[in-house]
Amino acid sequence: MKVLLVNGSPHPKGCTHTALEEVASALNENGIETEIFWIQNKPIGGCIACGRCADLHKCVFDDVVNVFIEKAREADGFVFGTPVHYAAASGNMTAFMDRAFYAGSRAEGPNRFFFKPAAAICSARRGGTTATFDQLNKYMTIAQMPIVSSAYWNMVHGSNPEQVRQDEEGMQCMRTLGANMAYMIKAFAAARNEGLEPPTSETKVYTNFIR
C-alpha cells in the first residue's frame, strides 16, 4: 500500500515539503509506503481544453503532469500540498491539478483517483489557508475520492521549515492526518478482501442551465 504526496511548491525542501514529511512519517509508522512527488519549478501550462487526452489517454503536453498520472496508477491514496499564493494554491499547482485530474481520468487502465482516499494540505506565513484548502478539496470531491480528515483543517504556518516545525498544532494535524489515512486505506483493503467493492460509478451525465 502506497500514498503519493504531491509537493506543489516551487521549493523542493520548503514549508510545504516539511508538512508533507510529517504526514509521510505517520503513514510510514502505520505500515504505508510513501513517495513525495515534487512538481518542480518549471512553468506548467494550464489545460487548453483541446480534448486530446481522450485519444492519447494522457495530457497532450508531455511534462511532469504525465509523469504523475503514470505514478498515480499504483497509488492507494494521495496528499496534495501547496503553499498559499494570494489566498489560493500556487499557479503551477493549480495548472497541475487541472490537467492531472482531467487527463488522469482519461488515462488507460483503472481510474487513477476513483475511491482512493485523499487529502489536501496548505502552508502559509499567515492567511489564505482556508480558501486554498477549499480549492484543493474540490478536485477530490468531483473525482469521488473519500476525503481524509484530521483534528483541524490541514494547514501549517511559518516562513521557513524551522518555523513550520515550531507550529506544534499544525504538525500534530499532519501526524493525525497520516494516521487517519493509513487506517482508511487499510480498512478499504480489508473490505475488498471480504468481497466488498466500491460502488459502480454511473456514466457521467452532462447538463447545463438551459436544459
Image (tube, rainbow, N blue to C red):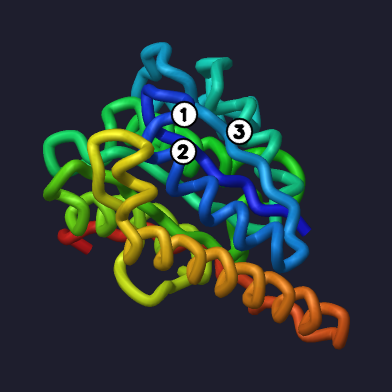
Residue 26 percent location from the top left of the image: 61, 62
Residue 196 percent location from the top left of the image: 77, 85
Q: Residue at x 65, y 39 (%)?
A: 107
| Residue 103 in view | yes
Circle 2 packing at 10 Å, graded few (<14), some (14-19), many (20+), is many
Q: Amino acid at mark 1?
A: Lys
4 left or right, relative to 80: right
The disc at residue 13 is 1
Residue 196 vs residue 92, the one in the foreground: 92
Q: Amino acid at mark 2?
A: His
SS label for mark 1: loop
Residue 198 percent location from the top left of the image: 68, 77
76 left or right, relative to 20: right
User: Where is mark 2, residue-wise?
Assistant: 17
The CA distance from mark 1 to mark 3 is: 19 Å
User: Where is mark 3, residue-wise?
Assistant: 68
The CA distance from mark 2 to mark 1 is: 5 Å
| Residue 48 in view | no
Mark toward the start of the polypeptide (2 vs 3): 2
119 left or right, relative to 170: right
Residue 109 vs residue 74, the one in the foreground: 74
The CA distance from mark 2 to mark 3 is: 17 Å
Circle 1 packing at 10 Å, graded few (<14), some (14-19), many (20+), is some
Marks 2 & 1, CB-CB < 8 Å contact: yes
Residue 193 vs residue 81, the one in the foreground: 81
